Image (spheres, helix red, strand yellow):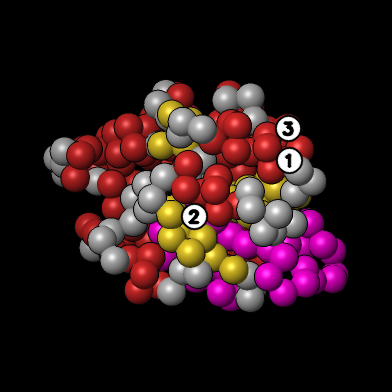
Amino acid sequence: MRYQYLLFDLDGTITDPKEGITCAVAYALRQQGIIADPDTLTSFIGPPLIDSFQEFYHMPPEQAALAVKKYRERFEQVGWLENLLYDGMDSLLRGLQSAGCRLAVASSKPTVFVERILNHFGIADCFAVVVGSELSGARTKKEEVVQEALRQLFGASRPALHTAAMIGDRRFDVEGAKAHQLDSIGVAYGYALPGELQQAGADFIVESVEELTALLMQ
């Protein structure tokens, strides 16, 4: 196996969350009198929500925090169910687990939603560690999430160089990996902008779950 330890992002990597996230963002914006087509809101998939509301709609922190609260009103009810498991992902995760890899989820989504989604798709048992952000707003940066996932996997020790990798679809995942000297694998089937993963310096880039499987199962 190429790696002994693998950290997976969730949105855009394990599952396709487009409908749930973009419709919840559109709902949150609508509560503040802003009308937006959900199809134009895919840039919200990946980074911390509060950062995105501030960046894309120039909201001050207090207004962005309210937008996140409104987003969660819809997401908690129906948004988390508007999610699709990528074809071939279940087989990949179980194949890696059977081969002796230790798997973790490292997501900026709140842990409560990450666990709910993993259980919904019947893949929670594939992961030794599941780390997300806190509903309070703590631990939203990807480097913080990766740090906590590594702490839970290894304690005070560190994985040997090139035995662990972070897998994700956005530059934040690559940056989180680099912050902790992990290899990074960018999945271009997610929601990265054109050239984003290359510019971030991903060690590998794959175009499909099939290519990801071929890379990891060597």
Q: Which of marks 1 and 3 is in front?
A: 1
Q: Residue at x 69, y 43 (%)?
A: 96
C-alpha separation, residue under disc 1 versus residue under disc 2: 18 Å
Number of the label disc, if any, that sits on residue 125 = 3
Q: What amino acid type is highlighted by mark number 3?
A: Asp
* Magenta highlight range: 150-179
Q: What amino acid type is highlighted by mark number 1?
A: Gln
C-alpha separation, residue under disc 1 versus residue under disc 3: 10 Å
User: In the visual, does 116 lie left or right of 149?
Assistant: left
Residue 148 picture location, percent across and down: 70, 61
Q: Name the residue under label 2.
A: 168
Q: Is residue 39 above or below residue 184?
A: above
Who comes first in sequence, dot 3 or dot 2? 3
Q: Is residue 30 above or below residue 57?
A: above
Element at badge 2? strand
Q: Nearer the viewer, mark 1 or mark 2?
A: 1
Q: Name the residue under label 1.
A: 97
Which one is nearer the viewer's eye here, 41 or 95? Answer: 95
> From this viewpoint, which residue is outermost toward the front?
218
Q: Residue at x 75, y 49 (%)?
A: 101
Category of crowding for the residue at label 3, using alpha-carbon neighbours closer than 10 angstroms: few (below 14), some (14–19), many (at least 20): few
